[in-house]
Image: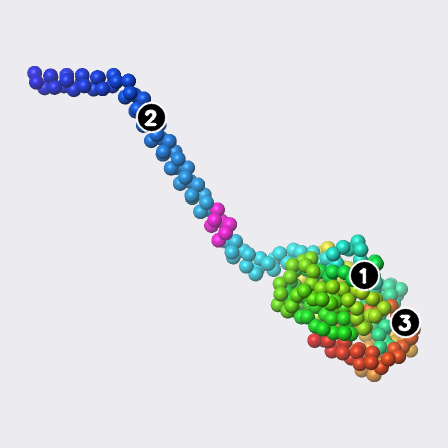
Amino acid sequence: MREEENKSSQNKSKNSFFKKRWVYPTVYIASAAIILTGVLWYQNSATDQLDQSEYRATDMPGKKMNDQPAVEVNRAMENFVMPVVSEDDAVIQMGFYNNDSDPAEQEAALVFYDNTYHPNTGLDIAEKDGKEFDVIASLSGTVKNVMEDAVLGNVIEIEHDKGIVTQYQSVKDYEIQVGDEVEQGQVIAKSGTSLINEKAGNHVHFEIRKDNVPVDPHEYFNKPLSALQEANVTEEKASSGADAGKSEDDTPADEGSDGTAPSEDSMKDVTPAEDKPAEDGSEKDSSTNAGTTSNS
């Protein structure tokens, strides 16, 4: 009897408890709070995992990908550009001497210096108005050499890949030094003048070389560095060398006024052919210096 009475009293207590108005709302609110807390915790946990995953996917491998090899890949994808800020304002005063050009174009690409005609190994670029202008890097690269040279008008050499360089002659007011990393389009100097090409006035003499062999810049403008990397460049194909020019008295261009044979590398910058021999003996000394500087 007592057990039945106890059970009966317990049931009455439970019934009376659940009959209270605040019980069910309290249970609902507590349940909702527990569920909401669980959902928020799960979302925060998933967000943290996603953040960590993104960090690993982008930042960590990025350090490896952004090392030097990635920079080299980016350089290989850049296109050669003319070393001026505005190509529309630029004019080519003298072009590159090419073996395959017609005789008229070849004659127009000969520079007369020290009583001898030499094939032009680059492009002479000036502004249409003849004024001074900014010289920019044709491609991203590393400054390999900066030389002061009155004959050539000073020289900057930038290396873009093993054996591939661009040269900027007849420049002044350098804004870089050896070892600097430069970006494509970065201003590296101002245009200037040179003794070897005084008639050109304010200009820049621009060359592209592979394994020290000059190539026609026009053939690589708007083409990637990889195009030159894959090209088979030879001295004979790139430029005619000694067979190209004739001195004023029709002696071979490879025979200088002093009887010595200037190297192909000494044939820097250009000027329109003139019929008057050099009258100042100092120019002959400058010619010797030009060959020495270029070969360095």
Q: Is residue 98 visible?
A: no
Residue 274 image label: 3
Q: According to the image, label 1 marks what residue? A: 131
Q: Three-letter amino acid code at disc 1?
A: Lys
Q: How crowded is mark 2: few (under 14 residues within 10 Å), some or many (20 or more)?
A: few
* Relative depth, front residue between 174 and 215: 174
Residue at (74% x, 56% y) in the render:
85
Query: 103 left or right of 34?
Result: right
| Residue positioned 44% across, 47% down in the render | 52
Colour scheme in the image? rainbow
Q: How far apart are marks 1 and 2 (CA)?
A: 82 Å
Where does residue 256 sit, x and y in percent of width and height?
83, 80
Q: Residue at x 64, y 69 (%)?
A: 178
Which residue position is annotated with label 2?
29
Residue kind at label 2, given as amino acid type:
Ile
Compared with 221, 233 (above or below) is: below
Q: Disc 1 to disc 3, how far (Cα)?
A: 24 Å
Quadrant in which the C terminus appears: bottom right
The reply to whether the magenta stretch includes residue 58 is yes
Q: What stretch is highlighted in magenta?
A: 54-60
**Circle nearer the N terminus (1, 3):** 1
Write down the quadrant of residue 278 in the picture: bottom right
Q: In the rendered structure, does residue 188 fall within the stretch colored magenta? A: no
Q: What element carries label 3?
A: loop
